[in-house]
């Protein structure tokens, strides 16, 4: 009897060592309330991962794509990458005396954001080019890391990388635990995201797809470097998302998650494939804990995609009702 | 004593169940002779995977990149993708009566390859555009799969996907067993490779980097499709390789494998990183079992990279001496 008990103990400890102990009792989606979205997610994952099920999806086909701004982390009061660019303009100003008399830099330096961004897309592009090019890829990654470690969100007074949605972080982990490979497919810059996403989301750089500038290979003091050029390579937004999913991933995703009209084509592309497909939209309905915006918003406008979600039966998360917690830093 | 023996037995069987039994007796690199290249590869892998070693490389950083043509599969008497394009021209000719009078199509259809390719890069580009564009990505993948399943190599009379180098296939498996993520970084077309590489090399589509044409998202009969345009997106050769490694992978590789000057910048980029790095060149020295070519060859020219391998101490595989078997179909 004693021997048997010992054997059981050894076996259990073996199982423990190899991480095969019985499933934990903790809910992997603990920050999700028991609403329809959580039920839809878990029902879908259960059916596609159940061997022998007619809707079983082979592990190598389990690709899940996530928009970033407004889907994995917040995007108000302005895209965080724009906040990064504005901060860089200020930091770089001493070596650019000409900016004092040149828009949009002049207004940025005077703290007049409205005038600065009044120049529209052209002005934003100028700000991005001035701050995202003219250095090597490694230098840029260093600048982003420094920013991520120090800059604070104006409303939450937290690092930007703390302004990620806790329910979505749990969802990423839940999908990976079920054999999904999780990718970011964002309008944000691919090189702006890579330095911090691995730690924030557990997503490695090779699973990040985003907008990009061109780079040039050259020798600098006998060492090869990649220099970031002030030229757009790809805008990963709207129809650019399926194009880049095809270029970078080369498989049609099984699940796609977005929050705005910029994600519409990605959701269409994902759900148009054969077999089981899942599309979800994060609807920003919580003016108290976060922000409430959709059809009229300049940032993260959600209009056509919200209509299409209705007609196609995509899952729409009511952030206010369905998320027990928005950010990890909430009490 | 009996209890102790039992405990040991249980532990050993536990270890067996979880795949941690002693290393198998089969050599994972059985097609490699005991030459300097095999020794260099295994010594490198052992030191970077040994925990606590000063040269230990974390699993997530273990990125290995492989050129395809001439490195993983053969590239003579012409790049296999060009053979594919020529075959397509013939298959498509009935719906293109204008080709009868138009070069380079006219000569291809007349079987006069020398004249057809005499038009140089422009002619080749025309052949590629005519055969690789004007259809959806899914239609193209279907055409490639059909070709891979049926077309035969002119010398070996085998399917092209059988003309892969057995020692390199073993190397891919060996690296993956040691926690490396293996990527293809090829001058070949990204969409030409993806339909067959997963089966041939165990490399999933999302780990394939290559040259690409542009695509356009559009609705066709109410369904979203990606149409392949006759426009070059990226040429993944020479300095284009580090550029695309940065774009697609976003990490500097730890190991890189190539065979020609088109791989030089990839090898430079890989080895210029800090910490342990490994670069290898497959030198085609076997006129009997395969082909012998290097500095003077039009296909897979190996000249500058061979010099640099000498000065930098990169591993150069002497195919004739170091590979016991070149292809799996050899007796």
Image (cartoon, coloured by chain):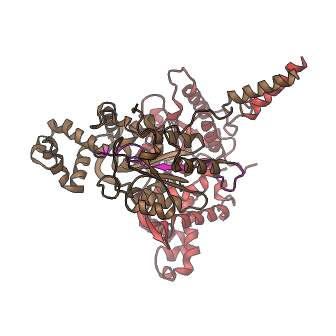
Chain colours: A red, B brown
Q: Nearer the viewer, residue A29 or B42?
A: B42
Q: Residue at point 34% right, 50% down?
A: B214
Residue B50 or B323: which is nearer the viewer? B323
Q: Quadrant of residue B6?
A: top right
Residue A256 seen in this snapshot: no
Give the total of numbered labels: 0
State whether the magenta stretch is mostly helix, strand or loop: loop
* Residue shown at the point (59%, 66%) measured from the top left: A143
Residue found 55% across the figure and 43% down from its top: B175
Q: Position of residue A255 (x, y in %)?
A: 51, 37
Residue drawn at the location 12% of the way across and 48% of the way down: B102
Magenta segment includes B71: yes
Viewport quadrant of the C terminus of chain B: top left
Q: Is residue B135 left or right of residue A4?
A: left
Residue farthest toward the right in the current orientation of the protein: A2
Residue B291 visible in the picture? yes
**Residue B251 pos. (x, y %):** 54, 55
**In the figure, A270 relative to B49: above or below?**
above
Q: Does A26 sit left or right of B137 as displayed?
A: right
Magenta span of residues? B51-79
Residue B304 on the magenta segment: no
Residue B234 lies, in percent from the top left, at 36, 55
Residue A314 in percent (x, y) is at 50, 35
Q: Does A172 sit left or right of A305 as displayed?
A: right
Q: Nearer the viewer, residue A156 or B99?
A: B99
For the view shown, which residue lies furthest in the top direction? Answer: A1
């Amino acid at each position: 009897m004693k021997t048997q008990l010992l054997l059981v103990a050894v076996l259990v400890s073996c199982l423990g060592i190899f991480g095969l102990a019985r499933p934990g009792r903790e809910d992997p989606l603990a920050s999700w309330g028991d609403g329809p979205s959580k039920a839809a997610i878990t029902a879908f994952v259960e059916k596609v991962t159940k061997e022998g099920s007619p809707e079983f999806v082979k592990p190598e086909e389990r690709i899940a794509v996530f928009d970033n701004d407004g889907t994995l982390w917040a995007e108000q009061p302005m895209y965080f990458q724009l906040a990064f660019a504005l901060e860089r303009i200020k930091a770089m100003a001493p070596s650019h005396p000409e900016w004092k008399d040149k828009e949009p830099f002049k207004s940025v330096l005077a703290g007049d954001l409205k005038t600065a961004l009044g120049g529209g897309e052209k002005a934003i592009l100028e700000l991005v080019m001035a701050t995202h090019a003219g250095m090597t890829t490694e230098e840029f990654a260093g600048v982003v890391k420094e920013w991520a470690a120090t800059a604070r969100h104006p409303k939450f007074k937290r690092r930007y990388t703390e302004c990620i949605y806790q329910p979505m972080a749990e969802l990423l982990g839940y999908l990976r635990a079920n054999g999904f490979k999780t990718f970011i497919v964002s309008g944000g810059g691919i090189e702006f995201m890579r330095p911090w996403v691995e730690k924030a989301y557990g997503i490695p750089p090779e699973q990040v797809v985003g907008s990009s500038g061109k780079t040039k290979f050259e020798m600098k003091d006998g060492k090869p470097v990649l220099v970031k050029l002030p030229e757009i390579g790809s805008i990963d937004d709207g129809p650019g998302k399926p194009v880049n999913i095809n270029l970078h991933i080369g498989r049609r995703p099984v699940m796609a998650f977005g929050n705005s009209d910029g994600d519409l084509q990605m959701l269409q592309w994902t759900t148009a494939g054969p077999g089981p497909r899942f599309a979800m939209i994060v609807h920003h309905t919580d003016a108290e804990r976060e922000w409430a915006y959709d059809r009229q918003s300049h940032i993260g406008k959600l209009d056509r995609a919200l209509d299409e979600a209705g007609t196609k039966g995509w899952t729409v998360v009511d952030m206010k009702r369905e998320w027990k917690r928005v950010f990890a830093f909430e009490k």
